[in-house]
Amino acid sequence: EADIYQTPRYLVIGTGKKITLECSQTMGHDKMYWYQQDPGMELHLIHYSYGVNSTEKGDLSSESTVSRIRTEHFPLTLESARPSHTSQYLCASSELERFTDTQYFGPGTRLTVL
Amino acid sequence: GQQLNQSPQSMFIQEGEDVSMNCTSSSIFNTWLWYKQDPGEGPVLLIALYKAGELTSNGRLTAQFGITRKDSFLNISASIPSDVGIYFCAGSSSNTGKLIFGQGTTLQVKP
């Protein structure tokens, strides 16, 4: 079972606030990912990282930013939250298995912006 | 960009019935993964497939990597109420680690 943690699990916040969603993994995985998911819908990749000091934008444009200063930590920040940012945010990390990456997910953060 | 078509979109079955769902792609994948997501939780990996033609089981779950490398299916035998959830397929065609996800199949099981 994967050891990947996200905090907070639920967050309700007002428009214009700055927020940081935390993601940590204890498996030593180099690659980490952030996805955005609306209820019952597919996952969309918004950021990923290949390792320390590496960050890339994903397939879905997002106003959020990420940083990767330590291998185990991959926080996501929204400088000014808006109602359109209301969604579930899922963090994942991957390890190389049989020459390809297998992703393991955290429990998610459900963000509501009022 | 690459897309996965997952079907059916939803299923409502009786406890004890078998279930089958599949994903197809217009592109070749070198990895297929199947996840289950419970409400308010993150997806949990069920089965990983790494080779064309590979057939893998995990308890009552069986998944296969299509020979053409453009499709995969997941079967659940003798369904039980705790099988309820959303099942996602995901494929990877590169060594970047990035996955493409299907739209999900929502499974409901009637006791």
Image (cartoon, rainbow, N blue to C red):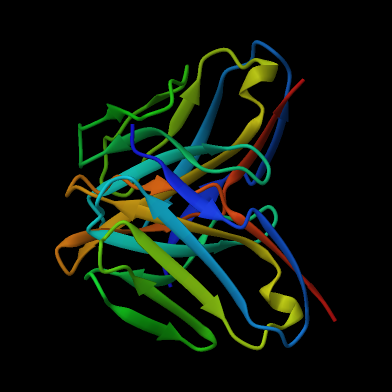
Instruction: Please name whichever residue, B109 or B7, is drawn nearer the observer in this view of the structure.
Output: B7
Left or right: where B86 falls relative to B1: right
Q: Is residue B79 left or right of residue A43?
A: right
The furthest residue to the right: B111
Q: Vertically, is B13 above or below B102?
A: below
Q: Position of residue B109 (x, y in %)?
A: 77, 73
Q: Nearer the viewer, residue A10 or B66?
A: B66
Residue B96 at x, y = what percent?
20, 44
Nearer the observer, A34 or A25: A34
**Residue drawn 66% across the image and 46% down it:** A40
- Identity of the residue drawn at 31% across and 56% down: B70
Residue A93 seen in the current view: yes
Image quarter where the C terminus of chain A lies is top right
Asked if residue B25 is positioned above or below residue A38 in the image, the reply reads below
Q: Would you identify the image quadrant in which residue B42 lies?
A: bottom right
| Quadrant into which the N terminus of chain A falls | bottom left
Which corner quadrant of the image does residue B85 belong to? bottom right
Q: Is residue A109 above or below residue B72?
A: above
State the image coordinates of residue B32 (x, y, percent, origin top left): 34, 62
Q: Nearer the viewer, residue B55 or A40?
A: B55
Q: Residue at the location (61% across, 43% down)?
A: A41
Please provide percent x and percent y for residue A107.
56, 54
